[in-house]
């Protein structure tokens, strides 16, 4: 996505344990973009703002583009970049309409698992962001300040638009993030402040801002003579509404993404038997698919092996999985290094990394994970 938009370099922030795997991505997918990979030590969980502080010495230029690693989209981000520049925006967020209803989705796993639909309330005056808050943070009514109503002739509040976690922000906004260490997440903590304070008056610059005891707010970081396209606010926060996109950060969205990505593609280094029947399947490198097998709507990860007399239907099979003879798997997610023993029947089930089924096992709507592990997607 970044390469197609003209970017030649990118900073990638990942857990230390994933650095080696991520470093192989350019060669695996024939990408020319140069990746500077930064690892998060230990088991730390950092928010987006925390991650920016980790690489603060590497952030240069007048604008910073932040992309979540789980974003999938077809449309180029060039239109968003053009909007940001034309409006001289302090902040631009990419928004989109949801592609499916989580509540009505049928996904693998335990029936007792309830997948909640998280919604945001987003107020727009044309393309300008005037309100951004999570629905869960609103008790009974949405409050819009008099400043906003006086400045904007009309504000429309949307509850059917989702945040894509693709942002462009000015360097001075990034400087404020580096200063205020109470801000951990951009969406939940920075964005509401940034949207609200654009309707403030400019703050007179004083000489004591560099003193240790001086408490600085975001207004202290706004450059003088900050000219926005509209001219009505101190600075501008904008929204770019894109086409279909998915944030693959939950099991329902991961399942939906794989359903939409299905096609017929077999890696040149995969071995598929002449009598194997494949329909709408993606077969990865070094896979082995034996004769007398039937695969329909299957994504088969690198190094996996499917033995004879196996039926796979509508499944995601990750890397280095072994499916032994006589097994039947439907509508399931099988994670890395699993072994499906012979004559097993698996339906609407998620098997976590390294699981092994018993011979002739029957599993329906189950979630099988080690107690100390989570499913990695």
Image (tube, rainbow, N blue to C red):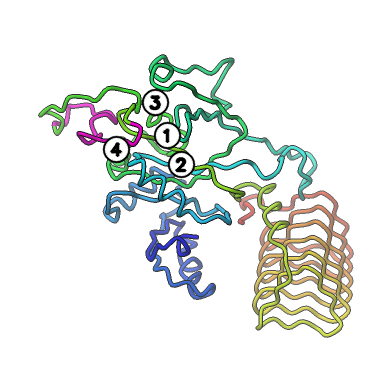
Q: Which residue is label 2 attached to?
A: 93
Bounds of the magenta segment: 211-230
Q: Real-space Cα distance between discs 2 and 3?
A: 15 Å
Look at the numbered disc 1 and give the secondary structure of its residue: helix
Q: Examine the image and state in which quarter residue 205 appears.
A: top left
N-terminal of the two: label 1 or label 2? 2
> Which residue is more in the foreground, 3 or 114?
3
Comparing labels 1 and 2, the label whose residue is closer to the camera: 2
Determine if the magenta segment contains residue 226: yes
User: What is the CA distance from the residue labelled 4 to the residue labelled 1?
Assistant: 12 Å
Pointer 3: what residue? 196
Residue matched to label 1: 191
Disc with the residue nearer the chain's start (4 vs 2) = 2
Alpha carbon of mark 3 to alpha carbon of mark 1: how far?
A: 8 Å
Q: Residue at x 44, y 54 (%)?
A: 42
Mark 3 or mark 4: name the one nearer the start of the chain: 4
Going from the N terminus, do you reach mark 3 or mark 1 first?
1
């Amino acid at each position: 996505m970044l390469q197609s938009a003209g970017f030649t370099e990118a900073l990638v922030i990942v857990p230390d344990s994933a650095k080696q795997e991520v470093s192989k991505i350019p060669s695996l997918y024939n990408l020319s973009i140069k990746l500077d990979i930064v690892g998060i030590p230990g088991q730390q969980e950092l928010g987006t703002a925390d991650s920016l502080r980790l690489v603060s010495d590497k952030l240069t230029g007048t604008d910073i583009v932040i992309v979540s690693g789980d974003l999938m989209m077809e449309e180029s981000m060039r239109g968003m970049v053009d909007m940001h520049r034309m409006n001289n925006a302090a902040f631009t967020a990419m928004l989109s309409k949801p592609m499916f209803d989580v509540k009505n989705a049928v996904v693998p796993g335990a029936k007792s698992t309830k997948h909640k639909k998280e919604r945001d309330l987003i107020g727009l005056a044309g393309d300008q962001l005037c309100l951004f808050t999570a629905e869960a943070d609103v008790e009974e009514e949405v409050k819009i300040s008099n400043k906003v109503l006086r400045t904007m002739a009309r504000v429309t509040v949307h509850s059917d638009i989702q945040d894509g976690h693709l942002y462009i922000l000015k360097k001075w906004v990034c400087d404020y993030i580096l200063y205020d260490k109470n801000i951990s997440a951009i969406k939940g903590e920075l964005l509401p402040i940034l949207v609200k304070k654009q309707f403030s008056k400019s703050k007179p610059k004083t000489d004591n801002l560099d003193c240790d005891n001086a408490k600085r707010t975001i207004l202290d970081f706004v450059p003088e003579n900050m000219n926005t396209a509209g001219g009505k606010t101190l600075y501008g926060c904008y929204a770019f509404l894109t086409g279909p996109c998915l944030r693959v950060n939950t099991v329902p969205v991961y399942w939906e993404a794989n359903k939409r990505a299905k096609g017929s593609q077999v890696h040149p280094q995969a071995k598929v038997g002449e009598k194997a029947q494949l329909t709408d399947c993606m077969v990865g490198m070094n896979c082995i698919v034996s004769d007398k097998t039937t695969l329909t709507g299957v994504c088969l990860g690198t190094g996996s092996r499917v033995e004879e007399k196996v039926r796979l239907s509508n499944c995601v099979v990750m890397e280095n999985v072994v499916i032994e003879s006589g097994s039947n798997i439907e509508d399931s997610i099988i994670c890395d290094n699993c072994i499906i023993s012979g004559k097993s029947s698996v339906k609407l089930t998620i098997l976590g990394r390294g699981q092994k089924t018993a011979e002739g096992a029957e599993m329906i709507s189950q979630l099988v994970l080690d107690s100390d592990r989570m499913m990695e997607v």
